[in-house]
Image (cartoon, coloured by chain):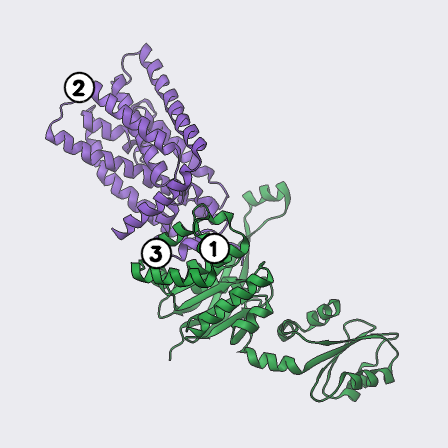
Chain colours: A purple, B green
Amino acid sequence: MHTLRVYRRNLGAHLRATLEYQADFWILVVAAVLTQGAGLVLIATIFARVPRIHGWGVWEVVLIFAMMVLAQGTSELLAEGTWGLAGLINRGELDRMLLRPYPCLLQVCASRVGMNAFGNVTVGGGLLVTALLHLDVAWTPARIGLALVLLPSALVIKVSLTVVANSTSFWLRGAINTFAAGMDQLGELTKYPLSIYGVGLQAVLATALPFAFIGFFPVSVFLDHGRLAWIGLLTPAVAVYCVLLAVTVFRRGLRRYESAGN
Amino acid sequence: MAPLIEATGLVKEFRRPRRDSGLTGALKHLVTRRFDIHRAVDGIDLRVGEGESVAYAGPNGAGKSTTVKLLTGILVPTAGEVRVAGVVPHRDRIANAKNVGVVFGQRTQLWWDLPVGDTFELLRDMYRIPAADYRRSLGRLTEVLEIGPLLPVLARKLSLGQRMRADLAAALLHQPHILYLDEPTIGLDLDVKDRVRTFLRQLVADGTTILLTTHDIGDIEEVCGRIVVIDEGRIRHDGPVEVLRDALASASSVRFQLSASAPLDLIRERLGDAEVTAPGERELVVRFDRTTRTAGAVAATVMGLVEVRDLRINDEGIADLIRRIHRPDEVTARSGAA
């Protein structure tokens, strides 16, 4: 609890610092809305020509999309600092974090707040609610319970995968981690139903880099959609796996840390 | 009493990519990766007792900062053992962090984008400093270091002197038993240097154990009781600062420019226990003990044997002495330039 409280305060202090740049804040909120808007236009365009993609209707796809955007916003809010990890390693700035009696990974995560987080959380949340209103969901207690487990699990998976992607900086040692950016781009593919991709890519996105568990699989099981909907029930397990993976990779990497200078 | 800081056979090796310069060099490195092993710290044994104030001196790249990083747990040693207040720093980082404070002169520990006061509050939370202790600690540090007006200022807006004082306060808020300082006075003006040293002396008087690396003789003489000299990753000298200072009080040298090359053997014979060296062909340096002979007598002796064009008398500084301990040739060259 103490750990969480310190994390929140650390993040809060950086948030206050960030919010001093008002122009930046609004530009990035608008940027997030425009970026995600473009994605929605794409979806709308496709569904204007075909009624369904691989059995998925428009609001179902929007729901997947909404989960992805919400997860992205969460990651930008809680773990944006990891995108600075390569620079921290490169300049030897992890030193000061290693000198404090607090987990290094959490200090890295809280070292920055992504300003597009606000735009993405708002857009993602809004789309999520809109899609759910358009879909004919029977809100039985079981389904509500399911949603309450799936949503946080999906968000945890996104944050953990961001940590994993950026922890590769310990091995790559560049000043900017292009691998992490590439991995993140790959994850963007799961904004659309997984079944439209080739089997190989599907396998990668479902297992090695389980981005499909952020949107596609949880939505499948929630809407009871398709033969493989049951896989979505694994979402909480995948979340636990991703957290362990993130912590392990980060710790391994930290052992390679060599500071800078003499 | 068991030493507070205890390092045995400490070794740290870095693997450095060997790469030719330029784009071709970089491309070649992508295909054939070659590495050099660089031994920054090479078998260091160091024991520091409670309440000691130790200067850790040596030339650039000698391994001073690497040692500090090993002692603080930032780096994992390649070989050897470290124990600080009974804790192995790199293994139990968090327990160690509570016992020690660290100040890096070249790099701030403050959060760059936050007001100094916010940084202090975050540190209070991280170190779990009880409210009453925090108030007392902050009050004392604010007063002594005069940082009251700096609390609402963003760290990146501070001048170097202000930053160093804020950094010192940040490192001491949790009242650590041990304080490591890596070049704490680097780049500071004389006035701020003085204030920092006075403050450190006070800490030592209050019982804090201090280990500081420095190039600044003032830091050593004014703050420390013991000096450890390191070069190429090895300890070359370890002893009380006073002994060094006493040696200094009596050490003097005369430097001659000659018209012809010097008859070294003859001069050595006449000057007995004085140290005679010839850094250049027509140069001569005689180092002697001021308590047994005078500069005048030395000069007269040399002038009687060879024609002298110019001469200069110097008292040696502690810096010359430290350098002489491990680099005899370089000393003569540098004191010539001075």
Q: Is residue B79 visible?
A: no
Task: Indicate the position of residue B308 as horizontal and vertical percent values.
Answer: 86, 77
Task: Indicate the position of residue A122 as horizontal and vertical percent values.
Answer: 31, 28
Give the residue type at disc 2.
Asp
Q: Name the residue under label 1.
A: A258
Question: Which numbered circle lies on residue B121?
Answer: none
Report the Cα–Cα distance between label 1 and label 3. Answer: 28 Å
Q: Mark 2 points at which residue?
A: A136
Is A105 in front, or is B143? B143
Secondary structure beneath dot 1 equals: loop
Report the Cα–Cα distance between label 2 and label 1. Answer: 56 Å
Question: Which quadrant of the figure has residue A125?
Answer: top left
Task: Indicate the position of residue B337 as horizontal and vertical percent values.
Answer: 74, 67
Looking at the rendered image, the quarter that the C terminus of chain A falls into is bottom right
> Can marks 3 and 2 be said to lie on one chain?
no
Q: Name the residue under label 3.
A: B124
Residue plotted at (46% across, 44% down): A86
